[in-house]
Image (cartoon, grey):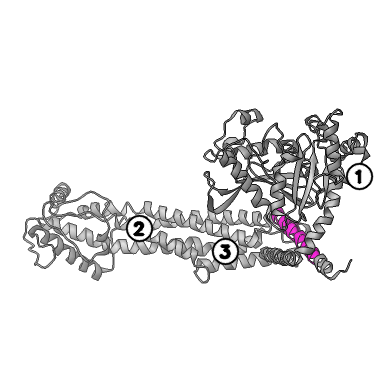
Amino acid sequence: MQKTDEATSGSQQSLICVPRDSGTCTRCPMECSMSTTEGAWSCTISLRISYASDGTSIATAETTQFGPIITDKKDVEIWIRRAQAALLNPLVPHNDFFNKTDKDLKKRPNALQFSKNVVCVHITDPDLTDLSFIDLPGLIQNSDDEDIALIKNLVVDAISGSNTLILVTIPMSDDMQNQAAFRLAKDADPTGERTIGILTKPDTLSVGATGHLQNWKDTLEGKRDPLKHGYYSVRLPTDVERSRNRSRTDLQKLEARFFETTSPWNTIADRARFGVPSFVANISGLLVQLIEKNLPELRAKVAQLLSECKEELATLPTLNTNDPFTEVCLRITQFCQDFQSAVFGEHQKSLVQTNRTRYAFFKYDIERTRPNFVPYQYRNYVSVGREAERVPASGPVINVPQVKQVIAQSIGWELPTHVPYDVIKKYILAFTNLWNEPAVTCFHGVFTNTSDFIRKVLGEHFGQFKNLEKHVASVVQAELEKYKKETLSRLAEMTELENVPAWTQNEEHFLSEKDYWLRTYYNAQNDQGFPNVDVNRNHGDFDAINVMAMVRAYFQVAYKRIIDYVPLTIERALNQAFSKNLQKSLFESLQTDEADHHWFADLLLEDPVLAKKRGFLEDRKTRLELIKKRLDMFEHGTED
């Protein structure tokens, strides 16, 4: 708990460098966990934010990785300093500290003196023993009452758990009477079953400090301030020794040599009280006692972890048991069937629903191209009951005088009272010429939907096998591009059909619409607002109003064709044709020689990330099962 020497025995066990300064340099809790791994040494630092800047707890704690995964042990110290600085300056973005040097951090004033939030350090190493410990700020006396209370509360909370061993580190450069940490440890552990004293900095005592040397010798021998589990003394590497990057074995030899050659430590009979290795070895007995006491809780926790591990394993794709050629063919077949089913909306509905939404936007875009006829600019004009009239027209207003002007400009050798067809053609082409753009835009939207969806299905079927996924994706992309070209060509032909000639056999609908719009436009002059008055064909504006009615009626007929045929063409020429021919194209892309076992086996190599996760979970499952077995045997007093 209380430390001025921040390089604890845990850091020596993991052989990393933690911050060491004169005075208090640990200003927030550091939770260090070490675990064995088959891979190389690595260290990950995270920040666990459980408290706001004012010290009040937040509803949901957040843990975020801080910086990259560290692969060089020399970099751990500076990254821990940066992480601590980030917690002490909660209003500054975390990445602002990523490039700070040790000098920068020491010069920078912090917004907070201490923080209750935690720097989490996770170390994996093939040579480590699984272990977790919490490094807390040392208890202080000369500071604000608020800071003193904060640190005291941190310590009290951390040592209150019945499964926690309390390691009170005591620098020999200070007097035992100044160790406030002991009082807190005694309050949390009155019987002393969980408390161990660790005496540090024995190399700071001079030969002439005979009184201090004798006092600490008596402490180690249990004659002063006795503890149930006694004391251990460790000598940690100096800055110079650490800078030489010496191995763990070399550092342990240096420590052992110091205690064997330095008085009065070499006169103490119980040699198991010296050095980190002795401490780690002897503490196992205490851990056994804790296990016995908390065995029911431990068994329940192991059972829960084992169940969770098995559940996570069950979420991984099943490993292939077929021969490679058969497995590839089966997966391709199932993939094509699932995609085709989605295209026709038989099972998965999301693709169809997304495309229907896009087709509704296309309908809206076409409706906006309607001729914006407003016969009389300053008269009332209302049209009800017409779907295409419910959206605003995108074109400019066209009134009777403008139509009459176009008629006058188009007169050739026509007989009297005959309106030139060019007038009708001009206004029809004004909207049909606009239809290709929304049709192409609609296609690209649907093409994107299909591409995104098939990538999703690809991942579901082949994500376990990256080589196979890459091969299938390349064929899928080539086929998509082929059908994209064909579909765009068919859409261009379709929109071209709506240009010249303007023609329909749907005469009944056309004449009905023409009559409706003729009455609507004619009655607009009388502020009637509804087509309920007979049309006077001798009216001076009749020709212009009749042109408006014919063009508007033709729009109603033609736009209803295009809003159906464009979606149907896209579905038929793109999605349906693509899905029906995909399996054939994929099979043709395979090497047809079934004897080429290695090529198909290579396609079915599991994704390295997934394989690593599977291996980790399998290993974790094995270890948990072993722990469960040993706990069961421990409970029944049996051995392997």
Q: Are marks 1 and 2 in contact (CB under 8 Å)?
A: no
What's drawn in magenta, residue-wise? 599-628
The type of residue carrying mark 1 is: Arg
On the image, the x and y values in percent for residue 41 come to 77, 44
Nearest to the eye among marks 2 and 3: give it: 3
Q: Quadrant of residue 257?
A: top right
Residue sitting nearer the eye, 598 or 167:
167
Q: Which residue is mark 3?
A: 581
Query: Mark 3 or 1, which is nearer the eye?
Result: 1
Residue 271: image tag: 1
> Foreground residue, 158 or 222?
222
Q: Report the amino acid beneath label 2.
A: Leu
- Coordinates of residue 477 in the picture (x, y in percent): 57, 54
In magenta segment, residue 618? yes
Residue under label 2: 497
Residue at figure coordinates x 26%, y 63% from the top left: 556
Q: Main secondary structure of the magenta part?
A: helix
The three-letter amino acid code for the residue at tag 3 is Asn
CB of mark 2 within 8 Å of CB of mark 3? no
Q: Is 629 left, or right, of 256 in this rendering?
A: left
Q: Which mark is residue 311?
A: none
- Quadrant where the C terminus sits is bottom right
* Side (left or right) of 494 relative to 133: left
Measure the alpha-carbon separation of dots 3 and 1. Answer: 80 Å
